[in-house]
Image (cartoon, rainbow, N blue to C red):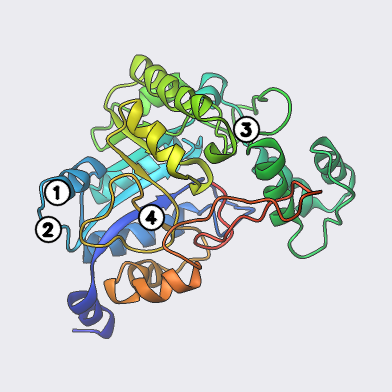
Amino acid sequence: MDTWRLLERVFGWGGVLAYHGVAESVHSPVMHVTPERLRAQLTRLRDRYHVVTLDELLSRWRHGRSTRGCVAITFDDAYAGIGRWVVPVIRDLDVPVTIFVAAEHARMGARYWWDTAERARLTRSGGEWDRCVAAVSMPPLPAREIGSMARLREHVIARHGGRWPGTLQPAPQESPWRSHTFEELRAIAREARIDFGVHTLTHPALPMIPAEEQRREIREAHRVLCDELPSVLPVIAYPYGLYDRATIAAARGVGMQAAVTMEGRAPGARPDPFTIPRVGAGNLHAPESLTLRLHRVLRPALIVRNRGMHPRVPRPTSAQASRRTMSRADGMVVE
């Protein structure tokens, strides 16, 4: 028995994996993954864990049954690469997945602002990146500066509630950096290994908007998804992984049965159903690192690294400024 397998037998716990976009070339390797890396990661998970549906995992927790060695796999934002690259992999490996859908993005196949901004920054041509920075009323921000994208992200969350100013923009159909449309999602839903969950209407940072708007974002998204898609779970993935007490109350109040976040660690034996942590997976994560972070023994170290049990809601840094600082949850992941 190799060392990894021994560690997994002694300390392995399981939990929930969170993926985002899949494409042959990725601009954010902490967040997105190539098909080859995805296959390697899911193969290792299948070989070392019991991969179950998210609904099965939640049911086990709800009824006090053991989840040791059980893993559920999720994909946030319903990126267009799922149909092309994810479906063949999960079919070959016979593993189920849950896709969390942002309803307004799925209406038109809209792009996500963080991908547009990061791709503009990486081109370093200046013009497009400068326009992104100006669009959210930030002072000039050098594209080459370390941490520029993180600063832009924090600003959009703190000043704009996580939503880019203006209307959503559709992307070219061939682009993997957009949401699947509902028509496309219905097509991939023919795959029995897929079900769906709620990712709000417009992907806001929920704690940054009023409580009634939080309820509307969750309630209406669930209604739209149930109208458009089969196999929709009453489960929300909090956008950006952020929540507070009002967010939990909103999710409960509109009928959600559970909620998942982004905290980079395995859950405990009996997690709060509305603050279930997930381990983020991207191209920079070796398959071994994913299984390592699912070890129960590492939970205390990962809690210390993430500076707490749960992601902290951004807070003002001064009375004059409304910039807020978002805690790191499993690297620099933007959901």
Q: Is residue 223 left or right of residue 31?
A: left
Give the residue drawn at x 80%, y 40%: 132
Q: CA distance from mark 3 to mark 1?
A: 36 Å
The numbered mark, 1 or 2, whose residue comes first in the sequence reads 1
Q: CA distance from mark 1 to mark 2?
A: 7 Å
Q: Which residue is mark 2?
A: 66
Q: Amino acid at mark 4?
A: Arg
Q: Is the residue marked by circle 4 packed among few (<14), some (14-19), or many (20+) residues within 10 Å?
A: many
Q: Amino acid at mark 2?
A: Ser
Determine the secondary structure under disc 4: loop
Q: Is residue 124 left or right of residue 42?
A: right
The numbered mark, 4 or 1, whose residue comes first in the sequence reads 1
The numbered mark, 3 or 4, whose residue comes first in the sequence reads 3
Give residue 137's quadrant in the image. top right
Q: Amino acid at mark 3?
A: Arg
The numbered mark, 4 or 2, whose residue comes first in the sequence reads 2
Image vertical order of residue 93 relative to residue 293, above or below: above
Numbered mark located on residue 111 in the image? 3
Q: Is the residue marked by circle 1 packed among few (<14), some (14-19), or many (20+) residues within 10 Å?
A: some
Q: From this viewpoint, is residue 166 visible?
A: yes
Locate residue 215, reporting x and y percent.
45, 26
The numbered mark, 3 or 1, whose residue comes first in the sequence reads 1
Give residue 228's quadrant in the image. top left
Q: CA distance from mark 4 to mark 2?
A: 18 Å
Q: Which residue is mark 4?
A: 278
Q: Are marks 1 and 2 in contact (CB under 8 Å)?
A: yes
